[in-house]
Image (tube, rainbow, N blue to C red):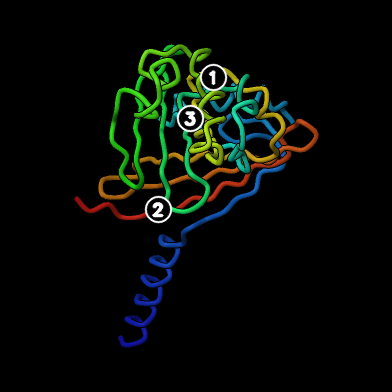
Amino acid sequence: MKNIILILLSIVLLSCKKDDNFPRTEIISSGSKWNIQIGSSASDVYKQIQQLGTEKHFSYLAIVGQGPFSKPEDLQSRLPFYDAITLSTSTGVIQRAVIAFKADQVSSIEVGGALPVETDKWPQDAPGNTAIQKGDALTVLYSKLLTIHQLPSFADYQLVLPDKTLSKALDPNMLNYTQWAFTFALNVRPGRSGTSAVVLYFKDGKLEKIRHDYNESDVYN
């Protein structure tokens, strides 16, 4: 009887260990994963990710190694492909301005340090024709960024693009980066959540491999 109990206990322990064997990693270097095809061009992969984002309910793609940038000229052709830009100090106490756009116009401006607050224009003490304001078109925004960056108080500000919004077309400059990344979550069952962290690796403009790290955890309400 004692031996039977020990055997049953061992089976239970092994089963628990198997169920909790997370995180798990898989490397895909041939075929496809979620209809993302190995060997596809970067532009085709972006379309595949857009479709996957709709299916898995995620909206952004990280471009690994992108920025920060030191001057507005680096971003002139890129702004229409994103939905925001951040300007922040590069030394000392961090101060930042987060400028979001919608329908190719500035839709919100948040300024401050760790907890930015919304405002109608930035910089606050700049003349009206220099300050970035809600409603500014992207072309106007870029022109004002050039002017603001020439002011001594803002000359050392760095510019950062956010993760790429999938709702907009491919930014051609994305093709210069060899790694893209995204994450999404799903409900495994009531009280259990799964998360996928994905990195795409490109070589010579083609998708070379996919790394998929998957983890599960209990959710407590």
The image quadrant that residue 74 belongs to is top right
| Circle 1 residue | 142
**For the residue labelled by badge 3, is the local secondary structure a helix, a strand or a loop?**
strand
In the image, taking residue 205 as reference, residue 110 lies left or right, namely left
Instruction: Say which residue appears at 34% left-offset and 29% top-offset.
Output: 124
Residue 61 coordinates in the image, percent (x, y): 53, 33
- Amino acid type for the residue under numbered disc 3: Ile
- Amino acid type for the residue under numbered disc 2: Glu
Report the residue that reaches farthest toward the right.
204
N-terminal label among 2 and 1: 1
Report the Cα–Cα distance between label 1 and label 3: 11 Å
Label 3, residues with CA under 10 Å away: few <14, some 14-19, many ≥20: some
| Circle 2 residue | 216
In the image, taking residue 100 as reference, residue 80 lies left or right, namely right
- Asked if marks 1 and 3 touch (Cβ < 8 Å), the reply is no
Residue 98 coordinates in the image, percent (x, y): 41, 32
Report the Cα–Cα distance between label 3 and label 2: 33 Å
The image quadrant that residue 19 belongs to is bottom left
Depth check: give the residue in front, 210 or 9.
Answer: 210
Residue 171 sits above or below residue 188 on the image = above
Which of the two marks, 2 or 1, is nearer to us in this view?
1
Report the Cα–Cα distance between label 2 and label 1: 43 Å
N-terminal label among 3 and 2: 3
- Asked if marks 2 and 1 touch (Cβ < 8 Å), the reply is no
Instruction: Say which residue appears at 36% left-offset and 82% top-offset.
Output: 6
Residue 36 sits above or below residue 8 on the image = above
Residue 48 sits above or below residue 105 on the image = below
Report the residue that reaches farthest toward the left.
221
Instruction: Say which residue appears at 73% left-offset and 39% top-offset.
Output: 208
Which numbered tag is attached to residue 69? none
In the image, taking residue 208 as reference, residue 136 lies left or right, namely left
Which numbered tag is attached to residue 85? 3
